[in-house]
Image (cartoon, rainbow, N blue to C red):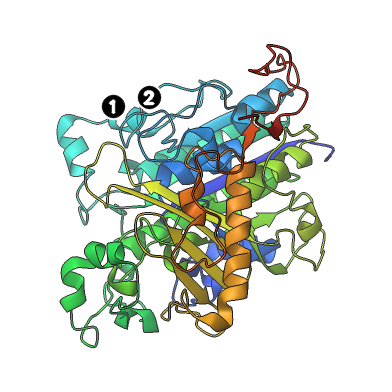
Amino acid sequence: MADKRQILFLMTDTTRWDMLGCYGNAAMHTPNLDALAARGTRFERAYTCQPVCGPARSAIFTGLYPHSCGGWTNSVALAADVKTLGQRLTEAGVHCGYIGKWHLDGGDYFGNGVCPEGWDADYWYDMRCYLEELTEEERRYSRVEGNPVKPEFTYGYRVADRAVRFLQENGGEDFFLTVSLDEPHGPSLCPEPFASMFENYQFPKSANVWDDLQNKPPHQRAWAGENLKRDADALKLTPRYLLGCNAFADQQLGRVIDAARELAPDAMIVFTSDHGDFIGSHALSGKGPAGYEEICHIPLIIAGGAALEGRVYPHPVSHIDLAPTLLHYMGVAAPTLPGHDLAPALAGGAEPVDEQVFFEFGRYEVDHDGFGGFQPMRAAFDGRYKLVVNLLSTDELYDLQEDPCEMENLIGREDTAAVRDALHDRILEMMNRTRDPFRGYYWERRPWRADARPATWAYTGYTRQKETEPGEARQLDYDTGMPMEEATRFKKV
């Protein structure tokens, strides 16, 4: 545990890994985050748990997969018996502030303006709070891409202002401060010079811009729609405002980083984003039910504290690893969580912390009939091979060493069947171990799985009750009415 328990947790919305200069795209204007990476550890292959806003955050702030914590789709609240990092750290005497987009209260996109348990209400500032500061005319104006604005009008600027105030008032004590921008998520509102910074810039076209989605899942072709008719040769990728707003977000986070270096110089600083954006790849748009790199591969930087300077960690890690890492760093006993502490990676360890990382999908948003509706997906990536099981569609296997653009679906190939089936076994084991409410024999009985067991109502035959946390009463065994002896046990038929 550090002498001072201080963590500054920064995040943006819709920043894929190659939207930062330090990840190899020199055209990106992210000097503050690039400098942070130079002073710390940059995780080359970090992955979201679900490539959509709310569920991604649910995993980060609970340490549980979206399917386990209740937050498996946008506009659904976390389960009542799930604790956030704010609650756990507040109970341990750490002052917790959350300033910015939350998206975990079950309300609409903007939130309900109410500070949840575990966070200091004096600093709470979700997007509903921001909109209520505006006139009706200003609200409408704030939702239109390209509208000229001054920095002070934007959500990101006001979030950064409050974050600096938190550090000024609390920089000498133990704290966990989250600063969560909505930027660069659309409408990507940003002032000059950022609004014009990428006016004539064309984002590099990956080979998968030419993906016609043949031998790919049919739900992806439905998603692509008219994009499959486009002329990929003539296509120009010009996400001017997204990239300009990304640069503006870097500037605002830079203000907070500078304040932290002055007022809390020993603080660990973490930066990540919830998910990426296709920007024309695979004929798809935005983010949603797919396991492709463009939306699942995200930036992750940890500087200060236990992180070595100038280190690049090459192995896959996951957002699910953040909660155990941060709790351990703060000296707080973590409950049973599915992720792994990244301390060995931060200390210079060369071995993989995770054998594989998992990501998933349920639906985009419970409020919307569209966006594909219910599209259950479970996926695993071991650093080379990625298996994506799409329950209501067809499945995918990619060899990212030979096919980094994920163009050739190997799901039916015999020469990769062994690695495919091994990843499949790990997905099934993870679903059972984490009490996935959607688990069942149908995930195992895929058309390509020759040795799948017959469909049975009992499936594995096991009961998997929730493990008890300190201070909680032990759950009772249904068969005896007595405290359960083992949470996971064979269920008598």
33 lies left or right of 227: right
Q: Residue at x 63, y 17 (%)?
A: 478
> For mark 2, what is the residue?
113
Q: Residue at x 85, y 37 (%)?
A: 3
Does the CB distance between marks 2 and 1 fall below 8 Å? yes
Image quarter (top left, top right, bottom left or bottom right) of the C terminus: top right
> For mark 1, what is the residue?
132
The answer to whether residue 98 is above or below residue 402 is: above
Can residue 177 be seen by looking at this rendering? yes
Residue 175 sits in which quadrant?
Answer: top right
The answer to whether residue 289 is above or below residue 280 is: above
Residue 23 sits in which quadrant?
Answer: bottom right
Q: Secondary structure at mark 1?
A: loop
Can residue 45 be seen by looking at this rendering? no
Q: CA distance from mark 2 to mark 1?
A: 9 Å
Residue 102: mark: none
